[in-house]
Image (tube, grey):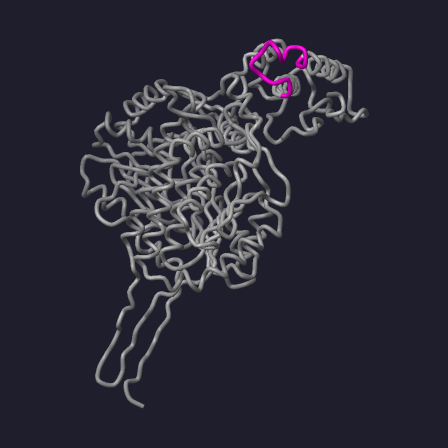
Amino acid sequence: PASRVHVEPSRMDSRALLALLFALAASSAALLLAPHTTMSSAALRARVLHAVSRSADVPRKGLTTGHFRGINSNAFRSPQSRRFRHSTLARCSTAAAMPSDVADSILKTAEEYPMLIDGKLRQGSAGTSPVVNPATEQPFAHVPSAGMEDLNDAVVAAKRAFPLWSKLDYDEKVTYLEKFAEELKKDAETIATLLTKEQGKPYASALAEVKASVDRIATVSTLGPLQPEVLHEDEKTRTEVHRVPRGVAAAITPWNFPVLIAASKAASALLSGNTVVIKPSPFTPLSTLAMGKAAERAGLPAGVLNIVAGGDDLGKALAEHDDVRHISFTGSVATGKKVMATAAAGLKRVTLELGGNDAAIVLDDVDIEPASRKIFQASMANTGQVCTAIKRLYVHEKVFDPLIEALVTHAKNARVGDGLTKGVTHGPLNNKMQYDIVTTLLDDAKDQGAKVLCGGSAPEGPGYFFPPTLVTGVKEGVRLVDEEQFGPVLPVMPFSDIDDAVDRANASPFGLGGSVWTSDPERGAEIASRLETGVTWVNAHITGDFAGKPPPFGGAKMSGIGREHGRAGLEEYTDLKTIRVAKKL
């Protein structure tokens, strides 16, 4: 065990040395205790080392988690965090109570989660990487890491498959996608469990996401084919406009809804005649790789759909690949700009669904009870990690107090915890980076006089948990209002004049979604039309429950380029081709 610990002696002090000695003793004890506990010695040792490394008694410049080789230091929170001021002894007690199923899951290897390349399931040439459960901050599985050779194989396979796939009749493509959806449905519970472990969302939400992915494939299948349009025809000429697929499409997906977004991008790209290479977020690769198993069983032609796993460098290499003709990316504005810059070198087409800072405006005639319930859900769903979640709330001063009171009640009734625990309504934030963003923005708001009405601090113990939090006493100019928090912290601000509220809602570089809440839907629709967003709701927000054919989705301003979903989502992956026929020489 001692050989697995690397320490920089120059950075040690007496407390760090004491912690190291304790860790080594605990590591040895783990070997003796293993026969008497449900955990393996390796799991127990890792848990104890993790507990010691995060102890508030160890100074940041002494022994840190980064000094332990073989452990993903990115998964751990700073030892200085205010969340972890309980004792080392308490930590060790928590470690000893580690459930056996969690310990067993750590032993799972990358062989269980292969990539799909050229119709075959295979491992990566760049080794493996740990996948961390955000509810425990512990790795529970390893995932294959694709090397450049693997990536090139995937893109080349997709390019090779494109000519035949693009010429298939639309109904034949639909048949393949239906088989894929059927296999996904068979694996729904397995994929949902993986999704909860790697993403953090409650199991019921994870299962709903997988089922929604199956439904999305079915919905997209009804939107085609993209028939040629005859613009003009007479006895001499005929002019047609065709929608033609581009070739290899790269789908780079985020960690908040990894299965649904991957399924949506793949279905639209494939049914419009393209072939696809999916690269999921390194935070949530497992559920997407599980989709590859379903695709392989469904018998999709080799190379039509490929799924590779890896870090940000792999995504960059995929976007840069000469044979990729379209890049569909969902993620942050900063990364979206990099994707666009990369695409510019090869004049590749891009679809970018980026960040949002959605404003909701509540009018003075609103029905408090149903509005408060829906607003709370729309702001706190998936622990606030939704691109189109309500992130700023403007409330008319006449209904400000009663709406706040109702929202606080909803927040206090929420149950935060491990998504695999029955009754939990809100899981953890997905990763340390996002946890730090949320806490930093909240701390900044408090420094500027914000009042926290509920929530505001995380529970003790491991996990990136943060409760639903409502904040007042802020305005534009405060980072929590101006930036996208992507977490369960909602600033609520009063207004008296509707024109002022609309101006404030529009005073943002983002323009993804927005909503108006009122008992007068026609008045609401008029105000909604003034919001500078890609999609706007009246008396709803983030819901996809649209009657009839699904509408296009995408952002205005810095919230994105292009459209997904609906028929526009199919057309997004095509080029316009004009054919003019002279009937006589």
Asked if 317 appears above or below 41 in the picture, the reply is below
Where on the picture, by quarter, is residue 223? Answer: bottom left
The total number of labels drawn is 0
Q: Is 69 placed left or right of 78 in the picture?
A: right
Q: Residue at x 55, y 56 (%)?
A: 341
Per the rendered image, the range of residues in magenta is 30-42
Residue 509, visible in the rendered structure: no
Quadrant of the snapshot with the N terminus:
top right
Residue 35, visible in the rendered structure: yes
Asked if 210 appears above or below 159 in the picture, the reply is above
Residue 442: percent from the left, percent from the top?
49, 28
Where on the picture, by quarter, is residue 185? Answer: top left
Asked if 411 appears above or below 561 in the picture, the reply is above
Front-lying residue, 508 or 203: 203
Magenta segment: does it hold 35? Answer: yes
Q: Is 293 placed left or right of 372 in the picture?
A: right
Residue 13: percent from the left, percent from the top?
78, 18
Q: Magenta part mainly helix, strand or loop?
A: helix
Residue 98: percent from the left, percent from the top?
54, 16
Magenta segment: does it hold 557? Answer: no
Residue 352: percent from the left, percent from the top?
45, 51
Q: Residue furthest right?
A: 10
Q: Residue at x 47, y 42 (%)?
A: 254
